[in-house]
Image: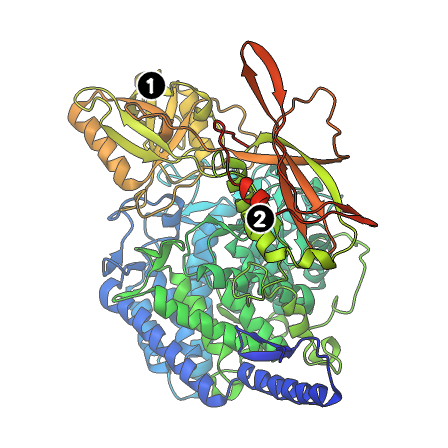
Amino acid sequence: MQDYTRRKESTGCWELDRPSGTGMMLKTLLITSLLGWAKCQESQSMTLEEKTVIRDQIIEMFDHAYGSYMKYAYPADELMPLSCRGRVRGQEPNRGDIDDSLGKFSLTLIDTLDTLVVLNKLDEFEDAVRKAVKDVRLDNDVVVSVFETNIRVLGGLLGAHVMADLLRQRGERMQWYKDELLHMANELGHRLLPAFNTTSGLPYPKVNLRYGVLNPLSRTGTESDTCTACAGTMILEFAALSRLSGDSVFEEHARKAMDVLWERRQRGSDLVGTVINIHNGEWVRRDSGVGAGIDSYYEYLMKAYILLGDNVFLERFNIHYIAIMKYISQPPLLLNVHMHNPTVSVRSWMDSLLAFFPGLQVLRGDLKPAIETHEMLYQVTKQHKFLPEAFTTEFRVHWGQHLLRPEFAESTYYLYKATGDPYYLRVGQSIVEKLNAYARVPCGFAAVQDVRTGTHEDRMDSFFLAEMFKYLYLLFSEKTELPIDIDDYIFTTEAHLLPVSLSTTQPSCQGNRSETVYQEEDLFTHSCPSTETLFPNNPSFAKTIRDSYKYLTGVGRAFHPLPVREIELPLHDNGMEPVEFLKSMGISITPLNEIMARDIGNQKDQKGVYRVKLVAEVSQTPEEEEVVPHVVQLISPPFLGRTVLTAGPAKFGMDLTKQEHGVKGSIVKASPYTACGQIDNAVELKGHIALALRGDCMFAAKARWLQEAGAIGVIFIDHREGSNSEETPLFQMVGDGDSTEDITMPLVFLFSREGAMLTAALEEHHNVDVLLLPKERQLGQDKKGKPFGMNIKLRLAEEGELEEGAARGPTLEFVLEKEELVLLNEEVEAEEHKGERQSQQQQQQFCSEAAQNDRTEPCSEESSQSLNSNNGPDSNP
């Protein structure tokens, strides 16, 4: 009996699939389908017991991570989970801008404080607050990121103060607490204020905690640019500090920065760029999206309205949101466009930070695109285990790193709270399982260096404890199981808890300047999510949206073979390149005698057989873009070309694949080694190939400084300790978003291990000559033919017709029949004999040729066998 149901592998459910036949069979199938649907609903739901088990698992995972930090790292800023020790700035290799989060203020402890309360670990919270008050200093002589210090440390202190004050008011614990955390927050706020000393009101990106910005001892203040999110993600923490401390200066500065960003938006598109000049307000990078560099600016417009009750923030958010949905959102994708010409997409990949956006859409109440984008992200995690740091619009890995970021878990939490759909509990369960399976190590949880290889990186950022465990625990908890009423708080971008009561219980400072702009309003312009409104009498609404994207990446698709329609190609065994090419296109190849034996009887029943000649034009086509391995080959004595280091190329600068002999030169270390400013040893570097360390600034910025100093090439060396080309896939270095046509010298990238070999050779021999070139052209390597692809262009012609000027040669023929296509070969071979050119045409016998009223008999067995014999010389098709 024909099987009328198909099994959905991902859920174990059954779906009806075109039943036919007797009425009894239809009834049976209908009953089976309804039973399967009921089981499907049961499998998606989650019992309280299951939720309790997962919640307990999350607590155990948190204990493992937080306990490892306290045991192996505290009072250091972060835990190094592979080394089982703390990361102290200045004692570990410089990681560039990443280290600007570290201020020698026990970052992970402060970032985790209010998570302890949410997880109902009140004893541990009280102990941690005592440690923070006793041990943490905020006046260290260290340059830190204003943005990171604000969201992690200031936000952490404020959230912890709010929790400590709540517990003190209940009278059960924290009776000793005298607002010490608020005093620390106030001190830190004043240490961040010097960053706002600019002509525009936009803050400097970095500040020295002890000396500020313009002090000669500050070692900062030379920066001229900052990212949009860096300037626009201050209002929640600064406004909360103003209203809790009574000092309005913080909120005033944060509002001014928001005003500048709003005023500098592109008026035609209502979009903002990614990087802006802090002195004149001009855009430095004009690409616009909702991911890295912009993300939390949009988030803080919406949340500032919720926290402070100021309509101006909601009006601005709604205007931006309309533009985002018009230009950037192409469900399920979120693209990056040019702010001045938003119909132009500026890149073909997305970064993982945009995973927060579905959660923000939930806050606005726009659930359909939130569900679509979230489902796309979930499919990517199913394909790669985690969200890669960046992935292409075809869902391939662009940057393979995964830093245990919480944004996807955040959006999962918001969607579950808005819809109540147990599907999102299952998504959360998969996050928990993958963290335990692929990120857990003996001393905590380690970031994944590359999702394709599963190798770990020796870092566990503080946001993992501050955000990931908070959202996962809340996802699987009932409101009655929490020590606080979670609805009384708004999450900052670092998931710290600020009370929404601040809008009414504390005075506001002077309002923002904002012109009135007409905007279209919809159902959700001034409302929060409502399942009654969104899902009227249709609880499966979310599922119907998700199902359209269920197999977006091709992972998890149940295999259902389609009816096979083969094209048979009877060619000889020699010279089979076209045959192999057709195989790669999915066209099966079968000997003609097998076709006849199988189909000889079927042809008698077929009507209307036509013969059409297929004229094929073969041309070379460029291969799909891929990373072309390059090498750094040491050619001076004593190496003499025997030492070859695998390197990655750049998408800008000189194209070494077009240089026949590569680029040769002696190597010199740049000073400063990061090459992020004026080069001190320009005289020594001129005419040589520079060595520069990755980090602190973009590859393109380094290249410009080095090219200006007179370098003829650059070898960038990875700053991540232990990275190597054997375990980590090569990647292409990209520019900084602006034109890189001014960079004309060759650029290659070495991982840390290969870079160490090169620098060791330089230290030992002082004068080392290298050759930069594609790997396939390295000296001493035999050249091999490069495979090429082909395009086949087809033209239909009448039999015997040949395009004017075309040479006689191998051709292909189609026989079009009622049920199938048979591709036949007609070979015309020319020979020279006794000094005279004689044309000898060999035509193979064909099995059938008929018009509608005239049919020929099939070929005999002998003639069909003769098609497979060839007594002449090699005849390539």
Q: Nearer the viewer, mark 1 or mark 2?
A: 2
**Residue at the (35%, 34%) spot, across then down:** 647
Q: Which numbered circle lies on residue 473?
A: none
Dot 1: element: strand
Q: Residues within 10 Å of mark 2 (few under 14, many from 20)?
A: few
Dot 2 corresponds to which residue?
861
* Amino acid tagged 1: Lys
* Amino acid tagged 2: Glu
Q: Which quadrant does the C terminus fall into?
A: top right
**Residue at the (73%, 27%) spot, across then down:** 802
Dot 1 corresponds to which residue?
664
In percent of width and height, residue 266 lies at 71, 43
Residue 659 in view in this figure: yes
Residue most toward the top? 835
Q: Residues within 10 Å of mark 1 (few under 14, many from 20)?
A: some
Mark 2 or mark 1, which is nearer the start of the sequence? Answer: 1
Nearer the observer, 770 or 96: 770
In percent of width and height, residue 693 lies at 33, 36
Residue 680 in view in this figure: no
